[in-house]
Amino acid sequence: MKLKHSLLLSVALLLTGSKSFAQAKFIHSHNDYANSIPFYRAYTNGFNSIEADIFLVDGTLLVSHSDKYLFPERTLKGMYLDPIAYELRRDTSRRLNLLIDIKADYQKVLPALVKELKPLDAYLLSPENPHGRLKILISGNRPVPAHYKDYPKKLWFDDDLVYPHTQAEWDRVGQVSLNFENWSKWKGQGAIPEADRKRLQKTVDSVHTYTGKLVRFWGSPDTPESWDTQIGFGADIIGTDKIEQLATYLQRKSLRKPANLIIPNKQAK
């Protein structure tokens, strides 16, 4: 009887404790510049990561998803870099990941970006400044891994698992970002097909095991069902265009990483 009771208790603990495997997530404001209050809406909601797409136009870095909608007043400096500098001075506990998606020729854009970042050098995370509170992550049109070494170490790179890397090249990678639609055509309503879930789970597990990098899926459905599914298969960073909704949703589940944590380059051991 005692043995039977112990077995039942073990099963009950496994069932009720299954949620304990869900870990708190970092949250990312996808195409942040497209919402009604760029930067501040995500920042004041405690987002860990904010995205800005950029073009270089006549020597100025402009923020836009498309070259059809470039406006001279929408500069990277005015919309993001100056507000970030102000907020980091004001709140010395806050940390942030700024994902910069390059929409043009990186060989022209990156030198201009490095110059524009100069006033923020004291805040920039790098091997030489491991306590830096601002992590700059380069995505979109970016150099192949063999050329990461050609750029300052205050720039980290978003990886898509397309190219092989040496260990030194992996050391320059800040996170892995993958196109959700390459794994599933699920639209975020009802349950994801089990075969798709398993593929996604296997991918995340492989990235964690072989690189230690954190994983984000872009292009994923932006629904509570999708957020739960991503939590379930172990994505580390959840992206959204629905800033308040995701922030509140994860807060209610006690699955939000604090705003004063920078997204690490590798999983904690």
Image: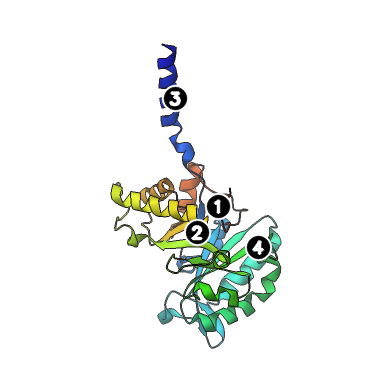
Helix, strand or loop at disc 1?
loop
C-alpha span from label 3 to label 1:
30 Å
Q: Residues within 10 Å of mark 3 (few under 14, many from 20)?
A: few
Image quarter where the N terminus lies is top left
Q: Which label lies toward us, 3 or 4?
A: 3
Q: Are marks 2 and 3 in contact (CB under 8 Å)?
A: no
Q: Residue at x 54, y 64 (%)?
A: 170
Which of the two discs, 1 and 2, labels the residue nearer the N terminus? 2
* Residue tagged 1: 267
Q: Which label lies toward us, 2 or 3?
A: 3
Q: Is residue 104 above or below residue 1?
A: below
C-alpha span from label 2 to label 4:
18 Å
Q: Is residue 199 above or below residue 101?
A: above
Q: Residue at x 41, y 26 (%)?
A: 11
* Residue tagged 3: 10
Which of the two discs, 3 and 4, labels the residue nearer the N terminus? 3
- Please state which amino acid type lies under the numbered disc 3: Ser
C-alpha span from label 1 to label 2:
17 Å
Q: Are marks 1 and 2 in contact (CB under 8 Å)?
A: no
Which of the two discs, 1 and 4, labels the residue nearer the N terminus? 4
Of residues 96 and 185, the one nearer the viewer is 185
Q: Position of residue 265 (x, y in %)?
A: 57, 59
Helix, strand or loop at disc 2?
strand
> Is residue 213 something that shows in the picture?
no
- Please state which amino acid type lies under the numbered disc 1: Gln
Q: Residues within 10 Å of mark 2 (few under 14, many from 20)?
A: many
Which of the two discs, 3 and 1, labels the residue nearer the N terminus? 3
C-alpha span from label 3 to label 4:
49 Å
Q: Which label lies toward us, 2 or 4?
A: 2
Of residues 124 and 50, the one nearer the viewer is 124
Q: Seen in the image, is 93 located left or right of residue 23?
A: right
